[in-house]
Image: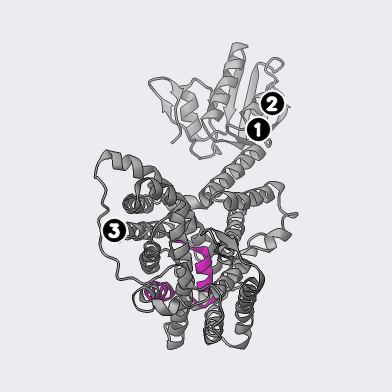
Amino acid sequence: MIKPTLATFAGRLSISDWKDSHLTPFTPNRIKIEILSGLTVALALVPEAVAFSFVAGVHPLVGLYAAFIVGLITAVIGGRPGMISGATGALAVVMVALVARHGVEYLFATVVLMGVMQILAGIFRLGKFIRLVPHPVMLGFVNGLAIVIFLAQLTQFQVPGPDETKVWMSGLPLLTMLGLVALTMVIIWVMPKITNVIPAPLAGIAIVAGLVIFFAIDVPRVGDLASIKGGLPDFHIPLVPLNFETLKIIFPFALILAAIGLIESLLTLNLVGEITGKGGGASQECIAQGLANTVTGFFGGMGGCAMIGQSMINVKSGGRTRLSGISAALFLLVFILAASSMIEQIPLAALVGVMFMVVIGTFAWQSLTILRRIPLTDALVMILVTIVTVMSDLAIAVVVGVIVSALAYAWNNATRIHANAQVTPEGARVYQIEGPLFFGSVDGFAEIFNTEDDPDLVIVDFLNSRVVDQSALQAIEALASKYEGLGKTLQLRHLSHDCHKLLNRAGQLMIDSDDDPSYGVAVDYSVKTGSFGGGH
């Protein structure tokens, strides 16, 4: 089975733990756990938001404001408690081209339009289509994202070179950095075995930061990335011309950003849902993400979406309710307003250690052991999505995975169609069709019949088949035309009432039965043209 791998993804947290936590009232201990979990997430959000700001080519506060606003709104009204949202690399890599060509004001306008699109997706309940994402695609997405998170941390092992370019650490600085990363990971691993008073990731950050500050160890710190000091975000209408030319510039970017943001958010929603044992919430999450991005655009933020890494930190730290996400956002604001000098002293090694543990908990390790036991197509899709996620981006990877899975499914069903032929005492030949009849199987359907040698009366029985689309109806009509051209009679049995209506208008001969199936065919029939039209 594939699904147990999601337990690994969740840091081996059991579904019963989640369910029990949702039933647990807000006791003082629960509130303490939620707040400390939020603090841990907030500490991990700072370097991520700053780094993604650099990727997008904007000021670090633009990413931090986005992490605060998007994180707060989605925590309050999002589709799944426990999820964390903020500025992400998947969006940043799209934004950089827009900022480079047109400036940051166009980015703010794009984020507003992106949010409106996501709200509309929620209103029209488009989030339900995330159900079409096969499980191998989700596993590939998880594994690919784990690798992306890992690779993103490697940049922290780079320092400015003599010509302002980044160079890799070496010698004692590298050994010191690796040692502190390893120490953080050991603390996170050991801490739950000793006590659960504070979240293990928070303990790892606090202990390593204390050692670095007390012994004045010379390692890169958060402040080396950029200053995070700032004020409250101000309401700000994007300074762009309100005309069609502006819309032509921002619409393509907004559409891509909206799609990427919703795909990543809804996949995270599904994966967290696997752990929590809860379904639904897709439309609510679309609206929450859209509202968050719309507000962010008006307050000088770069927009964002759900973050799997930070969501898993929240889960591992004990966060189960909306309070943890709200706390994370509020702590982040406190860091910006009043505690920037303290946060800037935290060594990057501690945060890298936390994210490395997230990678270990996120990667679906059991997916490596089941590759030989699942269908070859599923294994290839999983590997393909992982590679494309790492090499390109999440949205393309998911779309590619869904398309390949759909084509594989269509091919498998196309090869299933066949018929059992027999001759009745009256001399008629009966073809009992087995398997679905659709665009992929119409050629195989046509090859079943021997029109030249068949008797004058031919009966085609669809009891064990299903007519799926317009191509199937056209194949039946073409078959009838062949028999009619040879002066033979074709009778069709066990078709749905929808098929009866469509094919009767085309002049086909139907045989009604009490056990005719009931299903719709994805076509329209044009009375004016006497032909089949587009699907509906």
Residues at badges 3 and 2 in contact (C-beta under 8 Å)? Answer: no
Distance of mark 3 from mark 1, alpha carbons?
A: 60 Å
Q: Quadrant of the C terminus?
A: top left
In this picture, which residue range is highlighted in magenta? Answer: 305-331
- Above or below, 169 against 243 in this view is below
Give residue 26's position: percent from left, percent from top: 42, 83
Tell me the amino acid under the disc marked 3.
Phe
Q: Residues within 10 Å of mark 3 (few under 14, many from 20)?
A: some
- Residue labelled with disc 1: 433
Q: Earlier in the sequence, mark 2 or mark 1?
A: 1
Identity of the residue drawn at 65% across and 33% down? 433
Give residue 12's position: percent from left, percent from top: 62, 72
- Residue labelled with disc 3: 298
Give residue 502's position: percent from left, percent from top: 47, 28
Q: Secondary structure at mark 2?
A: helix
Distance of mark 3 from mark 2, alpha carbons?
A: 63 Å
Q: Quadrant of residue 288?
A: bottom left
- Residue labelled with disc 2: 448
Q: Nearer the viewer, mark 3 or mark 1?
A: 3
Q: Quadrant of residue 448?
A: top right
